[in-house]
Amino acid sequence: MSFKTTATIASFGGKLLKLSHTSKTVGCDMALNLYLPPQASLHKVPVLFYLAGLTCTGDNGAEKGLFQSAAAEKGIAVVFPDTSPRGLNIVGEDDAYDFGSGAGFYINATKEPYAKNYKMESYITEELPSALFTSFPSLDASSISITGHSMGGHGALTLFLKHPGTYKSVSAFAPICNPIACPWGKKAFSGYFGDNIEEWKKHDATELVKDWKAGGGLDVLIDVGTGDNFYKQGQLLPENFVQAAKSVGLEEGLVVRYQTDYDHSYFFISTFAKDHVNHAAKYLFA
């Protein structure tokens, strides 16, 4: 699979590439951003995947998250994928901000008409990394971490927990921690999976952590803003994730920081992006 480069932008001594390719997994063209730090011109570099939230594309994190500065310091490449398939002409796919286009939830849907194309879990964990590592030999396929925001934080946590050994570390900004218990999750999961609650639980970080048996501790960094309206409305539920981790003795390495007055925006993400890059670096260079 080949990528088309639509722009190359100098950034902190490295290059931000705006890419597109045709995905067999989701059945449409997908756009993304890839930041190559200056070290990538000298040797292989580890990779951090950043999964964006509802309504976002691969541009939001790359253009407003300010990950590049810290990534250039550490010598880490950052991948910014899109959040869903686009332009499939599925009836209703563009009717709401929290379902369909821009709202793939990083799962493989099982309910029609979304089952054929809404396979973002397979796209993020299989097709996209395989294509990137083939096309960009400076990326180290053996050293990958993952982070994300909101819906993307849900994606980062669940993909880390569901695919042990794939990612060296995980962190999240304002993640949807317990989607089976919040309005966003209930709407998305009923649309993508139907009414089988047991199927929903397979894609819920708070449920998954209860059965996490990858060995060792669980070192997770989560930041949540106390001024985040979605946190106040009960969409994120980080306390539920913490309680579930405690229930199985995994609380020691879990760090949840409640950042005073910060909201859900990229002002919040950009403020703490360096901390999340540094969290990944601990494991990518271990």
Image (cartoon, rainbow, N blue to C red):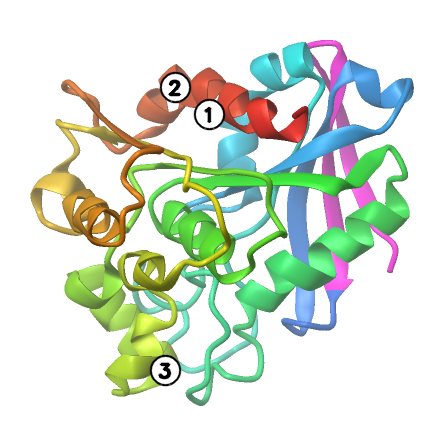
Secondary structure, magenta segment, majority class = strand
Residue at image mark 2:
272
Q: Is residue 246 above or below residue 62?
A: below
Alpha carbon distance from label 1 to label 2: 7 Å
Q: Residue at x 39, y 40 (%)?
A: 149
68 shown above or below 283: above
User: Which residue is pictured at 40% across the width and 68% down the height?
Assistant: 100
Label annotation for residue 276: 1
Between 276 and 219, the one nearer to me in the picture: 219
Disc with the residue nearer the chain's start (3 vs 2): 3
Label disc, if present, on residue 193 of the rendered structure: 3
Tags 3 and 2 in contact by the CB under 8 Å rule?
no
- Is the Cβ of the residue at disc 3 closer than 8 Å to that at disc 1? no
Crowding at label 1, few (<14), some or many (≥20) Cα neighbours within 10 Å? many
Q: Report helix, strand or loop for mark 2.
A: helix
Q: Position of residue 186 (x, y in %)?
A: 22, 70
Can I make out residue 54 in this image? no
Find out whether the residues at labels 1 and 2 contact each other: C-beta distance under 8 Å.
yes
Extent of the magenta region: 1-22
